[in-house]
Image (cartoon, grey):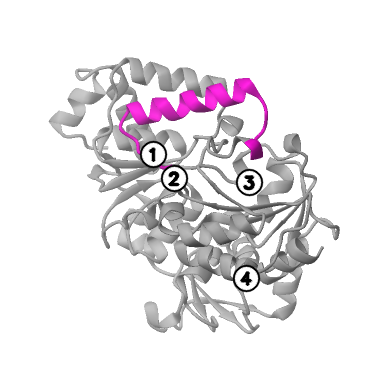
Amino acid sequence: MYLSREEERIYEGEEGWAYQIAMRILVKLGDLFEAERLIPIESAHVSGVSYKTLGDAAIEFLEALAEEGAKTRVRSTANPAGIDYDHLEEMVDLPVALQRQRRIIELYRGMGISPVLTCTPYYIRRPTEGAHLAWAESSTVIYANSILHSWTNREGGPSALAAALIGKTPDYGVHKPENREPSVLVRVEAPLRDEADYGALGIHVGRMLKDEVPVFEGLSGTEETMLKHLGSALASSGMTSIFYPCISCRGSRADLERLIVGLDDLNGASEDLSTVNREPDMIFIGCPHCSVKEVRRVALKLRGSRVRDGLRFWVCTSRFVRRKAWRYVDIIEAAGGRVITDTCAVVTWLKEIGVDVLMTNSAKTAYYAPTMNGVETVYASLDRCIEAACQG
């Protein structure tokens, strides 16, 4: 891979070990995928923040970078952590976890990474259309490429951090126009009533296509919230980083493969996402993190009702959105729910706080929670989640 004179200086360690290791990560990645050069990025989004998933070895690496004075060169954000320190009564009571999670956040902040911990950084500041990014977190990547029309590969935590420190990323994958072209036409022949149906569609198509790029025909609508659920599910069961929500987005292509999705396919995906049919200990909304519009929707459905005793009802979002939606936050919390920030159910401790059965309208959460959290899942629409919360 070609390096400029300045890049070679960093690679050889002339700006210190921290930037050298970052540059070597990027060069190794570029060589692996046959990139010809590095390209500048507008922003980075780093995953690998929750102590539950990160562990102690990563803290040692971050401390080594911090001791070398590593600072980001572009605007950078970070994924959810494992703890919401403003709602400790809802969190796991493990002093070591509380201490070490705080240390991770401090280390990232010291490097210049925003401490607003969210998987939806685009609700805080949308990237420029057509800008190159280095974003980790699969749901964020597919949203950036498909809805915001920015350009980013599906980075891992280390490569996103390296790109943040250098301000560049290797030019391969969906940074190149030819790799953004659709390869499969997905014709949807089933009604899509709500976010749960869009999530089930994403899970089914992701399993079928893996890393191929789909263009959809027959979606019931293209509201961003529904497309967010579609994309996050696609990126959970598959490896694609981009989709097109309507055939008119890319024009009719007779040479594309065809995949037809019917009602049986959606029902089968939904059924697979539910591991039990029991009353939940927790109802979780907000994976990916909620927008102001989604918080409002939950609040209006809860208004005048009461979450039944003994049930945890979490709505997860960013601090930024929580502040903007404070009127709706008040309604949710008056009804007995909690609007949680900085974390989400997937990356925090659930079994340790007494959750055995999790009910959610997020296909991504239902897909990952049984393995990552060791809990059973019930997959349902937001309306069904509200009914279960208030009526049992």
Q: Give the CA separation, mark 1 to mark 3.
A: 23 Å
Secondary structure at numbered mark 4:
helix
The residue indicated by pointer 3 is: 345
The residue indicated by pointer 1 is: 160
Q: What stretch is highlighted in magenta?
A: 89-116
In the displayed structure, would residue 366 be above or below residue 188? above
Circle 3 packing at 10 Å, graded few (<14), some (14-19), many (20+), is many
Sequence-wise, the earlier of marks 3 and 2 is: 2
The residue indicated by pointer 4 is: 301
Q: Give the CA separation, mark 1 to mark 2.
A: 6 Å
| Res. 216 in view | yes
In the displayed structure, would residue 169 be above or below residue 176? above
Sequence-wise, the earlier of marks 1 and 2 is: 2
Q: Give the CA separation, mark 4 to mark 1.
A: 38 Å
Measured from the top left, where is residue 190 in percent x and y?
65, 83
Disc 2 marks a residue whose amino acid type is: Ala
Which quadrant: the N terminus?
top left
Sequence-wise, the earlier of marks 1 and 3 is: 1
Tag 4–tag 1 contact (CB < 8 Å): no
Secondary structure at numbered mark 3:
helix
Q: Quadrant of residue 387?
A: bottom right
Q: Residue 136 carries which label?
A: 2
Q: Is residue 313 magenta?
A: no
Q: Is residue 97 magenta?
A: yes
Q: Nearer the viewer, mark 4 or mark 1?
A: 4
Measured from the top left, where is residue 270 in percent x and y?
73, 67
Left or right: 219 with respect to 140?
right
Q: Give the CA separation, mark 3 to mark 2.
A: 18 Å
Circle 4 packing at 10 Å, graded few (<14), some (14-19), many (20+), is some
Disc 4 marks a residue whose amino acid type is: Lys
Q: Give the CA separation, mark 4 to mark 3.
A: 21 Å
